[in-house]
Amino acid sequence: MQRAVAATFGLMVSTIPAFAHADETAPANVVSVGYLRTWVFGDAGVTSHGLEATYMHYPVAKNFLAYCALAQFETYGGAYRWALGGQLAMGFVGVELALARRGADTLHDATFGVHAAPYLSVGVLHLALRVVSPIGGADGRYPTEVGLTLGIKVPVPIDQMPELLRIRVPAGRPLRGADGTAWLPEVVLGACGAVERPLLGETSSRRVAAARFVADGQLECAAVASFLRLAEELRALAVDPALVDAALAAAEDEVHHTDLCFALASAFAGVPLAPGPKPEVSPRRLDWSTLAVELFVDGCCGEGLAAEAAREEATRTDDPVVRAVLTTIADDEQRHAELGWQIVTFCLQVAPSVRRDLDAAIAGLDSEGPSLAARVRRGAVRRLRDSH
Ligand SMILES: [Fe+2]
Ligand SMILES: [Fe+2]
């Protein structure tokens, strides 16, 4: 857990725009939204929950100096509190200054105050010592308020929004639990694989690239366990041994993909990143229908989509190292999708009633629209109908 937190910390620090902006002399703009928890001390003490949104402008990214507008809204027991103001930040430290209003409770009137708070901000964590002095001295107002605020906020660089909005697709075969949810490994500090150094220049966004390859690496790591389990399950069903061997070979491919993705993520993040431990996975007792449906959805469609997405992205990148990795993954995922087709075919030959469950699975697939995922699913459905 500590290693996972350390890795998250390292990734966030190394990838927030002020530290890793593609062009470090350019301005950077960051929006953060997150949860606030405040402990107010003294006679009017209270513990609160709330939200904070900030808009931060770095005139020159590499200087770490930033100006910020902030808005907070919190519930103070039965009352409420809001604050509007700004921040001046220099790297990890800064100060907030705001106009605040705390709502009335049974002992106090609603009170305006001047909110001042030195703070420490690292990655997603934000810790502030907050002092609020009431404006005016009328009876019934809240006394000066001193509190500690912990914020957990996700910084989103709005200059890079278009890249962030390019949603990733599945990069491997998911490892599903009994309830259908997919397992993913933690991310920890540690070496994993090696690649040539990718381009880290102005056209690449290290932050976006690191996050993207961490997510891909987690999916690839899950795919290793998924194929090892599949091999055991196929063996238990006494299928053609060549299919068992192909599943084991696919697990080896996924080990390689995991190494490649985490090696790229580490290079972009500037810290060594690796997947955490894999779970103990026992083979399930599958029937032919369950096997066929899972292979059709996760193999034929899922890995078919992973192959198409990686191939398409390989043509868009201008980084030869990234292109080589994506091309390798695309070729292997295509082979895994074909293994899915072989197993689905085997299931249909052994138990023709599987067809009914496949039809039901097809009816539940979202294959409408122009997205790549929908196009791949439509192609898979056509191929299933044409060939069986
Ligand atoms: Fe993969
Ligand atoms: Fe795969």
Image (cartoon, helix red, strand yellow):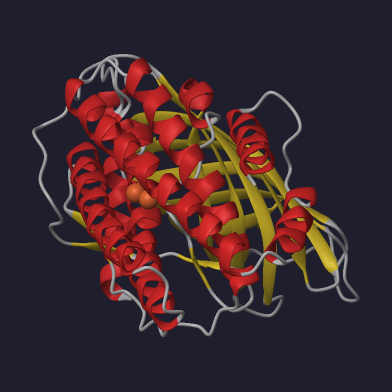
The residue drawn where x is 38% and y is 17% is 27
Q: Nearer the viewer, residue 341 or 181?
A: 341
Residue 30 lies, with reference to residue 145, above or below; the image says: above
**Looking at the image, can residue 223 be seen?**
yes
Give left or right: position of 97 versus 309: right
**Where's residue 173, x and y in %?**
44, 56
Q: Quadrant of residue 308?
A: top left
**Looking at the image, can residue 180 be seen?**
no
Residue 279 lies, with reference to residue 207, above or below; the image says: below
Q: Quadrant of residue 71?
A: top right
**Where's residue 227, x and y in %?**
37, 65
**Where's residue 221, x and y in %?**
32, 60
The residue drawn where x is 35% and y is 44% is 335
Q: Nearer the viewer, residue 358 or 210?
A: 358
Q: Quadrant of the N terminus?
A: bottom left
Q: Nearer the viewer, residue 59 or 246?
A: 246
The residue drawn where x is 12% and y is 57% is 191
The residue drawn where x is 33% and y is 68% is 244
Residue 22 lies, with reference to residue 69, above or below; the image says: above
**Where's residue 303, x and y in %?**
46, 46
